[in-house]
Image: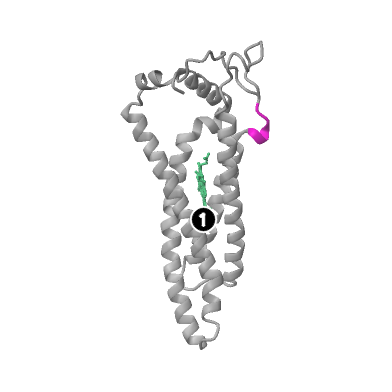
Amino acid sequence: MIESLPVLAETAAPPLVIFLNTMTLLARYVHIICTTLLVGGTLFYEMVVPIAIADLKPEQQLAIFARARWVFRRIVWFSAVFLVLTGILSTTRHWRAYAQPEQAAVEHLREASRYTTQPVTQPAPPELSAAMRPGWWWVAHASTGAMAILIALSLTIGRTPPSNPVIWMRLNLVVLMIVIFLASATRHVRMAATEPEPPTAASSPEDGSVPA
Ligand code: HEM
């Protein structure tokens, strides 16, 4: 660590890199906040409101349900817009990792070697199985995410709710849980595939290849 400090001082990040990293961080933060709003809003509208109004007269129930739907619509539209925008931003930022993970891994190793004075062997592209390709996980996350957003939007469009709204909400909650699992898998696989530990001369095989 101490050995690498002078190297770090010489290679301070340029302002553009700092700006892009800040935008990525903010996009990730907003993406997570909107996920919370969408999941929390759906859960509240589907589970809490019906129980809370169960003992009221039918006309009072309808009035409260309509108001709750009005608030839910705003939450859904707000989170849908920002989920898609920040999703596109994160996709752009990580596109190389999704489309060419082997190349991204080699670049990461090359970059890492700049920050150490330890001898680092020449990196070779790692062999990745289909499950270790972050691009497939991204496709699964983005497509189920888009589906969840469309279901949520369709529940709030129009003056009256669709027939069986509670069943649709329940279904969408399950889809949202799957979307969140696929998001964490995408992130995990992306980092595992494209940010491997740099092999040092002592730890790497004799042919200089990077262990998978
Ligand atoms: C068209 C819609 C969407 C697109 C294009 C999109 C795209 C992305 C991308 C590119 C990432 C970063 C994955 C990585 O680190 O490699 C991500 C993360 C994530 N997404 Fe989405 N997403 C979409 C919809 C959704 C929806 C509807 C939800 C809500 C359930 C959601 C929840 C998450 C979560 C929780 C993360 C993890 C954030 C993190 O740990 O950095 N996304 N999304």
Q: Position of residue 105 (x, y in %)?
A: 55, 25
Instruction: Give the quarter of the image for residue 205.
Output: top right
Tell me the residue at 66%/11% (across/down). Answer: 206
Tell me which amino acid carries mark 1: Ile
- Find the residue positioned furthest to the bottom: 57
State the colouring used for the structure image.
Answer: one colour
Residue found at x 37% / y 34%: 20
Q: Label 1: which residue? A: 149
Label 1 packing within 10 angstroms: few (<14), some (14-19), many (20+): many
Above/below status of 101 relative to 149 = above
Q: Please, which residue is most extreme toward the left here? A: 15
Coordinates of residue 40 in the picture (x, y in percent):
50, 62
> Between residues 188 and 65, which one lies in front from this camera angle?
188
Label 1's element?
helix
Seen from the viewer's position, the closer of residues 185 and 12 is: 12
From the viewer's perspective, tell me whether residue 185 is left or right of residue 65: right
User: As displayed, is residue 195 above or below residue 55?
Assistant: above
Per the rendered image, the range of residues in magenta is: 128-132
- Which of the image's four quarters has the C terminus? top right
Taking 46 as reference, is 177 above or below it?
above
Q: Is mark 1 within 8 Å of ligand 1?
A: yes
